[in-house]
Image (cartoon, rainbow, N blue to C red):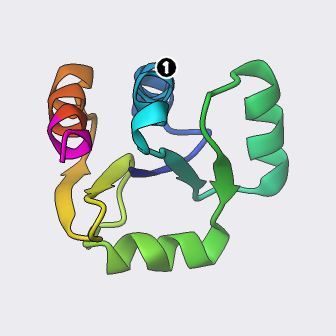
Amino acid sequence: MVNFWATWCPPCREEMPAFSRLQRLYAEKGVQFVGIALDSADSVRSFSESYPVSYPLLVGGARGVELAGLFGNTTLSLPYTVVLARDGAIRLRRLGLVSESELDRLLAELSAR
């Protein structure tokens, strides 16, 4: 699961606790969450000190914007979430908040395979 986010984005910050819970829940089943910040390294470092999460936060910068576009985020708005199956097929693309229950159902289905 790849989530494009920024420290200045309230909806991005809102969904992070759910992502942390689901990462812990599905880690043993091979699920990996990754947050790619379209932000500065200093902002991400400061944010992660105050709001730790259970998955890696990477700094994407300009390359992160490009990557989000390659994943289908044509408006380049945030948050943007992509869920990939083990074979690399994209199973979900979502601009805006993803509900914890929807993501939980999808991850349960994908991790059962």
| In the depicted structure, whether residue 63 falls above or below residue 38 | below
**Picture quadrant of residue 56:** top right
- Closer to us: 15 or 112: 112
Q: What percent of the width, then of the height, locates residue 42?
A: 85, 48
- Residue 78 higher or lower than 49, as above or below: below
* Vertical position of residue 112 compared to residue 18: above or below: below
Out of 14 and 17, give the one closest to the viewer: 17
How many residues crowd mark 1 within 10 Å: few (<14), some (14–19), many (20+)? some
Instruction: Point out residue 112 in the picture as x, y percentages from the top left corner.
Output: 20, 39
The answer to whether 68 appears left or right of 49 in the picture is left
Majority SS type along the magenta span: helix
- Say what amino acid the circle numbered 1 marks: Pro
Q: Depth check: 4 or 86 in front?
A: 86
Which span of residues is magenta-colored?
109-113
Is residue 93 or residue 38 the one in the foreground?
93
Is residue 80 rendered magenta in the image?
no
The residue at which mark 1 appears reads as: 17
Quadrant housing residue 90:
bottom left
- What residue sits 63% from the left and 66% below the top? 60
Residue shown at the point (40%, 30%) measured from the top left:
26
The picture places residue 50, in percent across and down from the top left corner, at 77, 20
Q: In percent of the image, x 47 and y 80: which residue is there?
A: 66
Secondary element under disc 1, as helix, strand or loop, is helix
How many marks can you see?
A: 1
Q: Please give left or right for residue 26 compared with residue 88 in the image.
A: right
Q: Residue at x 21, y 32 (%)?
A: 108
Q: Position of residue 48 (x, y in %)?
A: 75, 32
